[in-house]
Amino acid sequence: MKNGNSILRPIHYFPIHNVENIPEGAVRSAEHTDINLITLLMGASSDGLQVLRRDGHWIPITALPEQIVVNVGDMLSRLTNDKLKSTVHRVVNPPKDKLHIPRYSIPFFMHPKSQMDLSCLPECVDENHPRQFEDITAGEYLHERLKEIGF
């Protein structure tokens, strides 16, 4: 991790004042996974974070004081040959009576050095779990993914 591309990113979800113009099913942050190895989140100013369970149900996640939410990122998923799966998550709008309240969160996106090899770990590959990913470095993978999303 030393000299990696880690980012501490403050996120401000603005309050919503014009309730009539909110499309049905609108969310503050659409369903996604994080590109990095691990994301650490030490709470947020209000609820809204949800994680998708394996059975397809969304569950609310709230970090209580002195707790840290840990999300597996895509790089760690690759490294473990998908034994540790990326955390699918989103941020939903609050109930109508709380739309006027902004939401703040400050996730820490832990990225390795660009030169780190993301090849599947040998202990995560066997005849029941064949290799799912091509060899790539963390820097190459980050560049590839950022290109995909238009950065």
Image (cartoon, rainbow, N blue to C red):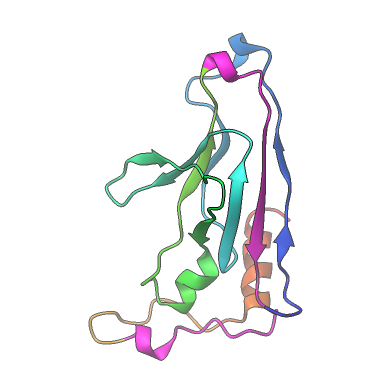
Which residue appears farthest toward the bottom when viewing the image?
122
Residue 51 lies, in percent from the top left, at 43, 46
Residue at position x 28%, y 87% in the image: 126
Task: Name the residue at 54% across, 19% down.
Answer: 23
Q: Horizontal and vertical percent for residue 9? A: 73, 52
Say above or below: 58 vs 75.
above
Instruction: Examine the rendered structure and indicate whether residue 84 appears above or below residue 123.
Output: above
Q: Residue 100 or 68: which is nearer the viewer?
A: 68
Q: Say if the magenta span includes residue 86.
A: no
The one of 33 and 110 positioned closer to us in this rendering:
110
Q: In which quarter of the image is residue 12?
A: top right
- Outermost residue toward the top? 20
Furthest toward the front, the residue is 66
- For image coordinates 48% across by 78% down, the residue present is 79
Position of 38 with respect to 57 (left or right) is right
Q: How many labels does the image show?
A: 0
130 vs 150, left or right, is left
When the figure is inspected, residue 40 is found, relative to residue 131, above or below; the finding is: above
Whether residue 123 is in magenta: the answer is yes
Placement of the N terminus among the 4 image quadrants: bottom right
In the image, farthest residue toward the right: 3
Residues drawn in magenta = 96-125
Please name whichever residue, 88 or 135, is drawn nearer the observer in this view of the structure: 88
Task: Pick the quarter of the image with the C terminus.
Answer: bottom right
Please provide percent x and percent y for residue 147. 68, 61
Q: In which quarter of the image is residue 97?
A: top right
**In the image shown, does 56 or 15 lie closer to the viewer?**
15
Residue 128 x/y as whole percent: 23, 81
